[in-house]
Structure formats: structure tokens, C-alpha cells
Image (cartoon, grey):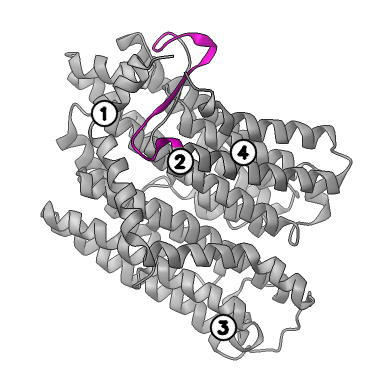
Amino acid sequence: MTLLPALPIVVPLAGAVLCMLLRKNIAAQKAIALATSFLILLVSLVIMAQTKDGTIAVMHVGGWRAPLGITLAIDMLSSVMLLLVGLLAVGVSVYTLFDLDAPRTRFGFYPLMLILLMGVNGAFVTGDLFNLYVWFEVLLIASFILLALGGEKPQLEGSIKYVALNLLSSALVLAGIGVLYGMAGTLNMAELAHVVQQGERGGLVTMVAVMFMMAFGIKCGMFPLYFWLPASYPTPPAAVTALFSGLLTKVGVYSLIRVFTLVFSTDPEFLHALILWGAGLTMVSGVLAAAAQYEIRKILAVHIVSQIGYIVMGLGLFTQLALTGTIVYLIHVIIVKTNLFLVAGAIKRIKGTYELRALGGLYKEKPGLSILFIISAMSLAGVPPLSGFFAKLTLIIAGLRMESWAIVATALGVSLLTLYSMTKIWAYAFWKPAPEPLPDLDPMPRAKWLAFLSPMIAFTVITIALGVCAGPVFDYADAAAGQLMDPEIYIGAVLGGAD
């Protein structure tokens, strides 16, 4: 048994405790949060080095073997998700040093951020459904407070919608867990996979699977219950929104992938067809809503919905190539979407508004910021040779091989509308002259400006690298997808892992 799977949980927990103990020392909190973020990244790199050859790191908490005890398990999918958490933690922590107001810092932003990261990491490493529910509740509590922190009216309205729909989702998860436990007598996912596959209650299993599909669909922002997301994500500061957009909905997607490749594989023709329909409707509804917006945060927030559709499309097609595309798309969109929200926050900091009609001329005033935006925006739209192109291309090829013409046509059409939305932001905010000259509200010395831009520069470089080095990324994603398509690998590691 290895203790490695516990570190992604223990490290942010220790950082959060230290921040709370030093709650009156803001400078110390910032230093602890930044150091903890780098440590989370370091731990994730060590874990990836241990699991990149297909090894699944398993820990039986307290020495109680699965399925009796709590199990933590990290496969290749979990490993890459943990790495992305580390990258986002570092980037957002650096960003907050320049763009987080004092009241939010005093009222616990940094310990809450670390508790949120602990909840996200816990969801990625847990090996049983009940603890997945627990980690969802941990991150829900932390995210709700972060969303409402500041007490502004739009924040409070958005946070109420956010928590109401997510509590409904949690109730569905808990109900599904109760039915599964009554049917199988276990909640360990590896053991459940065996019990469900060998059982004779096909109709009951399908009903529970639909419950989990609805629950995780709400959490990741799938059609039709996604309206909490555009109502809540644009309300907090940019650092909070960037963290949310990069991580929270992706925990829901990860959970969908995990349970529908491991536990609920008894009725793939019905369940995955349902997921595929949901993916197409999510894409279309999200991109059409974004095309009608004229506020940068709202455009980006609604586009989270359409991008979730692409990710779930691979799960709906349910082939190894499609799941490879899903994993590549997850890596791409987490980096790109976080970066776009950070860039939007930089625009708000220097010009005081997110409204496109009030902005203009940023290409001449801030050429560096303009370049950072356009690279990420074009990657989101799928323009080659950036990361989004190869992610979408993989999904399209997978769809063509399955002869799923409708979802392929939908994905291509939504990509064009995404390009329209991104070019609208570029045309209004960066290219056209401002209708009224807007002063630079926070002029910074060159060195401070570069430090402020450093997370955005780093994420932009990663976006380019994911496109230029698409081969190694694809190879890793394909190996991870191979693990998902052969659940016996995960089951054997969890139920037969040696000390």
C-alpha cells in the first residue's frame, strides 16, 4: 500500500488549517496559499510519474481492504486531473496577489480556496460512491461561500441559484447511493462494477444510472438544468470565476466518466445514447445563449455549457478513440477557459467594465494582453494548430467512425458559432475604437504588469504546447482511455492490490 493517494487531500487541508490559524496575518496567508499551491503541483507531478505507465496507485485507509474500508485510487485519468488542479492552483494563487480586494482576503478567501481544492482532489482520488458524495459536499460548501463572499446583490442571487440546484443534485446522488447500497451491499466502485455486471436487476440498475446521470449532469452544467451556471459564475471576482470554470463543472464530468465506464456498463445502447443526446443539446443551447450576450463574463460563462457538451460527446460515443478525445478536450478546455476568465479580469481591472459596447482599442493600448486573449480564444474555437483543434478533431473522427452524423454536424456547427462569439469579443473589446476614451484605472509599472500577466502567459504557452506537442498528449490520453475501456484493470488494482 502506498500513501501517495492521500497527499492531494492532506496538502491543501494542511495549508487551509495554517491559513486559518494565521487568519489575521494576510501576508502570511498569501505566502501559505502560494506555497501550498506549488506543493499540490509537485505532488501531482510525482503521482503522474508513478502512474504514467498504467500503474494504479491504491491506498486502503486504515489498512481495511476494499470493499470493507475506504479506498483511494489514482489511475491515469485521475492523475492528469490532479495535475490540472495543481496548475490552476498555482496560476490563480499568483493572480490573486494582484487582483483580490482586501475584504475578501480578510474574510477567508485563501483557506476557502484550499478547502475547495481539497474537495476537488478528494473527488478525483476516491474509490467509492459515498465518499464521492462527501467530497462533492465539501467543495459545494467552500464554493458557495466563495461565490457569496463580498455580499454584493448579484453574488447573493447567483449563489442562491447555485446552491439550490446543486443541493437537488446532491439529493439525487444520495438517493441513488441508497438504492445501490440496498441492491448491492457495497459502495466501492470496483466491487459495484462486479455486482452490477453479474446481477439480474437490469431495469433497476438503469433507473439508478439515469438518476446519477441527472445528478452529475446538473453538477457539470448539462442540458436542461444548467441555468444556475450562467446566473452564478459571472458574479464573483475573476479569480473565483476562473477557478470555478476550470474545476467545478469538470468534477461533474469526471464523475460521469468514472461511473459510466466502470459501474453502469450494463445497458450502453440506451444510457450512452441518452448521454449523446444530452451532449448535443448542451452544445447547441450553450453556444446560442453565448452568441446573444454582450458582456465578456457572460459570454465565457455560457460557453462553459457548450464546451461541456463536447466533453460529454466522447462519453456518449463510448469508444476508446472518443474517450481519448474527451480526455484531450478536458485538458485543453480547463487551461483555456481559466485563462480567458483571467484575461477578462485583467480587462475589468484596467478599464472598469466587462461590457463590450463600452470597450475598445485594447489592441493598441495593451498588445500583450490582446495576444494572450486571441490565442486562447482561437484555441477554444478549434483553430489549428492550437490545442482545441486537435481535441475537436479527435472527437469528430470518433463520431465519423461511429457514423453518428447528427452529433458530428452539431459539433462542427457549434464550433463555428464559438468562433463567432470569440471574434465578437475581439472586435468589440480589442479592435474597434472605444466609443468613449476609458482611462487606465490601475496603471502598473512594467515589472508589476508582467508579474500580473505571468499566469496568463504560462497558460497561453501551455495551450500552444498542447497543440504543437499533440502527439505525446494524445498518446497519454489514449492510454488513459484504454484503462477506462477495460474496467478489469481498475477492479483488479483496487480489489487485489497488495500492501
Amino acid type shown at disc 1 = Pro
Residue 487 is labelled as: 1
In the image, the segment drawn in magenta is: 50-68
Of labels 3 and 1, earlier in sequence is 3
Where residue 14 sits, quadrant-wise, is top right
Q: Nearer the viewer, residue 186 or 229?
A: 186
Of labels 2 and 1, earlier in sequence is 2
Q: Residues within 10 Å of mark 3 (few under 14, many from 20)?
A: many
Q: What residue is pinned by disc 3?
A: 430
Of labels 4 and 2, earlier in sequence is 2
Q: Are marks 4 and 2 in contact (CB under 8 Å)?
A: no
Q: What residue is pinned by disc 2?
A: 48
Amino acid type shown at disc 3 = Phe
Q: What residue is pinned by disc 4?
A: 116
Amino acid type shown at disc 4 = Leu
Q: What SS does tag 3 mark?
A: helix
